[in-house]
Image (cartoon, rainbow, N blue to C red):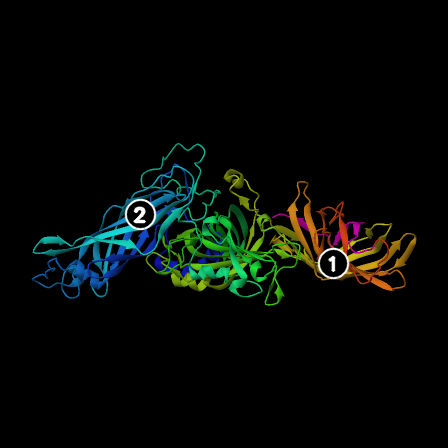
Amino acid sequence: MHLTPRRAAWTAGITGCCTAAGLLAGPPPARAALAAEIPYTCATDVAVHRVTVRVAGGRTPARASAGEAIRPGRVSLDLAVPEALEREMLRDVPAAEAPATPATPAASGMRQDGTARLTGVANLSVVVSQGGQGAEETNWPVFHVRESGDGTGPLRLAGEGPVPGVVPPAPGGVTWTAARLAFALTTETGGTTTSSPAMVCTPERKVILGSVPVSPARSGSAGDTTPSGQSAAGSAERLPECIRVPDYRTDPAWDFNEDPRLLDVFDIPSLPDPKGAENWVENPADPSRRRGSPYCIRAAGFANVKKVGAATPVAALTLLRRAVYGMAPNRNTGNTANYFQQRGYFNTETMPSTASVLSFGFMPTTATATVRQVAPPGPGSTGLTTGNLRTDLALNAGRPGAKRDGVEIGDETWTKAFVQMGVGETSVNGVRLDLGAECGTSPTILSLNTFTGDYRTGRLNITDGSALTGHIEIPKFTNCGVGEDLSPLLTASISGPGNYVQIESGPWCNTNVSTEKCDETTEPMTWTVTPGGPVTITQAPLVLTGPAGSELRCESLVMKGKLREGHWNSRFVIGKFGDVRFNGCTQRTGTRTSPVELAAVGTPWAFSVNAANPDGTASVQISRVFFTADLPAGQGQGLCRVRFGARDANLPDEKPAEIQGDYDNASHGFPVQAGAQLKINGAGCATPPPGFEVGSLHALGGGAYVFDPAQKITQP
């Protein structure tokens, strides 16, 4: 059963909810296209001309395996030849004759001026390489082209034909790059066809037509057993596998994306103080020494579609090369900023997912969708699909970071790439809605950001995983529907700005070690907190034991704040506690005990989840821990305020401490970790009490940290 056009139009409106829910989490496209716009330089003995060639079609799998054929199928070619070049090519060719009996141009294949349309042949050479090695230039079969358009403006020639497949012998991406173009024009005079001399042109720049990641051969594979005309790699859905990103500048499919709309990720926000190009240097400065590290990352999260109020899980695999080079402070100009900017690039592939909802609460609707990383749109595109990656880090993690416009900055990462969304198989109440094979949006920018801490909060190592967030604008839809254009209905129900995206990356696996190990890597780590919301953490008592028989003891330490609630919570700063109080505190030196006041500094303190333990507990920490104690000073100095923070024997600066432990859902708390110590980082007097001197270490002890109301912290 199929929907009629009228009923399809009505149904498409309610399909939007489900389509939106699937848009950012759909299955990877079974096939991608060999497509690009290539500017060519064509030189004659009179002038130099530009010919623009558009390549389209050529469906390739999103991913392939070694030993399995990749067959692009049929490719279309469209040439735009300037009028001046057309005249030069035909100057020694007899002009086409008009027919004795005029005919309608549309019916006869004639131009508006009554002359015959031109035909011709075109030959496109393509360089096929794998993993940056074994590049081989090959000629695609000759395309027979015919003039299209109304005969005004540049000469348009279009044709299509099959192109040969390739069988990658080993893992590593296969890339098609445009090379030489040769074409000739033909006219017909008196029943005789005459061809112009061939024009040979060279591409103005390197343009990638397409690329396919190639994984190791699947176990049990005995070569290519796929029927003719079908790609084995695209014939079945399977989870993406990790592959090693080729070394810098060894594979044309892997490099920085030079599109200005993606390059600006390295400039916004700007480098920190001191401003001025002379204060910052590229490191390494010599491009031949740039390397970076290849990683494979699994990620999961969710995306909201603002118009319909829908949220859906997202799953993906990212391949990247980190820290190919960076920007470092120029010590020769006296720049002492605690900062380094790493620069890299990446490609992301989404994993399978299907969305099913009740549209308007009663109509069962199912839709599949695709999201793929694509090359930037526009005439200047090189066909490179990579996105750009920037990470800002402190050179010394224990010290305050650099300042930008006078404000201290922490560790952050930004990613920026173009993505394209498509809608595939859709059904409403069990009835198939045919949206066609090309239903989708134009490319749009997806920019994500993650904060991984500073010296106060503690710093996450980004390779341990982090949460990236951002917003995406869903462009309008085109080419949706068969027999009737349903694109406006999908656009009205889905498209628009302000769609929030949150992705939690799992641990980064360095593929220099083993891609097989990376395929077994830990999945992304997100957390469910129940009930979350307002919570009080109490430790009773709090005990700090120092040298020379010194001790600080409080009846209780009480922290009041809020935990994030629900599913898909990032592990970093899952809660904040702004009300921190020490109750009933005393100080003992030798046999003397005195009441004292303790006060938290630099609140809110932060609560984070580090990892899941094999015994079912969760490794957690309270960070940003700074507090003062007003103690009786020696030699009649009155009170002496000492400052407690982190232990770091090599760091002269004051640093907040972290309290770590293993949270147990059964006891809704965690005990003090054995061996935990705090350090007195400073004092407001010359002679602190014995045992409380600056630099002295104090063992942290006392009762467990108990949560009220009881919290259940689980994965995912």
Q: Find residue 293 and report its horizontal and vertical position in percent.
A: 51, 47
Q: Amino acid at mark 2?
A: Val
If you read the primary sequence from the N terminus, does the residue marked by circle 1 or circle 2 appear first?
Answer: 2
Q: Is residue 604 left or right of residue 514?
A: right
x 14%, y 60%: residue: 91
Residue under label 1, please give it.
Answer: 626
Q: Amino acid at mark 1?
A: Phe
Question: For the residues marked 1 and 2, what is the alpha-carbon distance in whole angstroms?
Answer: 63 Å
Q: Find residue 515 and report its horizontal and vertical position in percent.
A: 50, 40
Count of numbered badges drawn on the protein? 2
x 53%, y 60%: residue: 280
Observer-nearest residue: 594 or 607?
594
Magenta-drawn stretch contains 202: no
Observer-nearest residue: 218 or 175?
175
Observer-nearest residue: 431 or 48?
48
Q: Secondary structure at mark 1?
A: strand
Q: Find residue 325 and report its horizontal and vertical position in percent.
A: 50, 53
Q: Is residue 382 left or right of residue 531?
A: left
Instruction: Please tell me in which quadrant of the rendered image residue 100 appears.
Output: bottom left
Confirm whether residue 178 shows in the render.
yes
Q: Is residue 628 left or right of residue 507?
A: right
Q: What range is drawn magenta here?
A: 692-716
Magenta-drawn stretch contains 709: yes
Observer-nearest residue: 510 or 354?
510
Q: Find residue 46 and report its horizontal and vertical position in percent.
A: 20, 61
Residue under label 2, please give it.
Answer: 126
